[in-house]
Amino acid sequence: MSWAPAFVERHTSLKVVKFFDRNTLWSHDWAKLWPLSALDVADRQELIGGVNLVAFSISPTKPGASLEDWQVVHVEMELTKATGVRAVPFVAVLAHRVSSLTLRMGPMASFTMHFSDLVSSLCRFPSLRKLELDHLYSSLLKEEIPCVLPSQDTAAQFSGCVDAHAALRTLSALISKCAPSLLLIHVTDGDYDIHKRYGTYSWSLDVTYKVTSNREIDFDGIPRFAMTGLFCPPDEIASRLCITARNTRYHPPFRTICARP
């Protein structure tokens, strides 16, 4: 990073500089770029061992500021171990002006996490305005998710996309109430449904929520869902979760007609 001060001094109109690690030069060791002196030894190990730093952005506090007066405003992280969920708030200690945060599951991660731990961790960023959550649903302890759908016997008849949407909407609603500056939550996820007769079929969702003045959430734009017609939800569930013919792509084979107004 020895080049950075001179680079910033030459480009006084810069508003944001983003650092992205494509070769794992520092993603597994935050200490290579971030001063961790604000954390004790145990917290440092928990952060380094459970969370990968994928990217971060810095921005000046005022036009023409020297690099010393730039602050971290965006962070992208991957959870690699269950301890990483508890380590996420440490980032708020190291960079309390973060306004944009992306949290995703690492490609090789395989663990479960408590619903309440995730909510608590994401509510610790005092300046957070935009939150992106990517492929977290499969790692949530399902028995801890507040029930918003019928019993499992009924729920098993429709796509995991429906269950994920319900759970992640609940998660987003809880986070919106305890993160005072949060304005947008973008959620993406996907997995596979398994049918005993017809095989395996993918599902996906892409939803953005805006946070209203009374800390409720509402769709920002049109949500996008995709699933096989074998697992389309009943009308009552589809209506409750705003799954419609306009925002959902059903792909064959079909068990029944899934198109709805």
Image: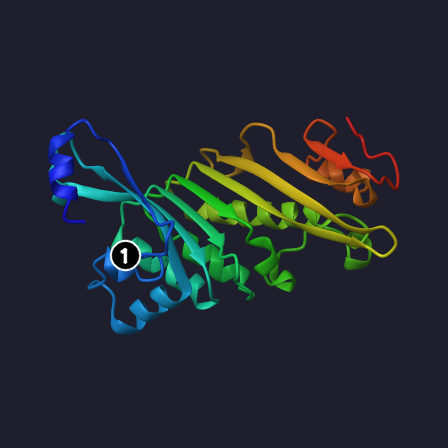
Q: Quadrant of residue 228?
A: top right
Image point (46%, 46%), residue name: 177
Image point (25%, 61%), residue name: 31
Q: Amino acid at mark 1?
A: Val
Q: Position of residue 131 (x, y in %)?
A: 44, 43
Residue 41 left/right relative to 175:
left
Which element is circle 1 on?
helix
Q: Nearer the viewer, residue 152 or 69?
A: 69
Residue 127 left/right relative to 131:
left
Q: Position of residue 243 (x, y in %)?
A: 71, 35
Image point (31%, 62%), residue name: 29
Q: Residue furthest front?
A: 23
Q: Position of residue 1 (x, y in %)?
A: 18, 49
Q: Is residue 24 above or below residue 186?
A: below
Instruction: Give the crowd class for mark 1: few <14, some 14-19, many >=20 residues within 10 Å.
Output: some
Residue 158 left/right relative to 40:
right
Residue 36 left/right relative to 161:
left
Q: Nearer the viewer, residue 105 or 37?
A: 105
Image point (59%, 38%), residue name: 206
Residue indicated by mark 1: 93
Q: Is residue 12 above or below residue 186?
A: above
Q: Position of residue 155 (x, y in %)?
A: 77, 53
Q: Nearer the viewer, residue 54 or 75?
A: 54
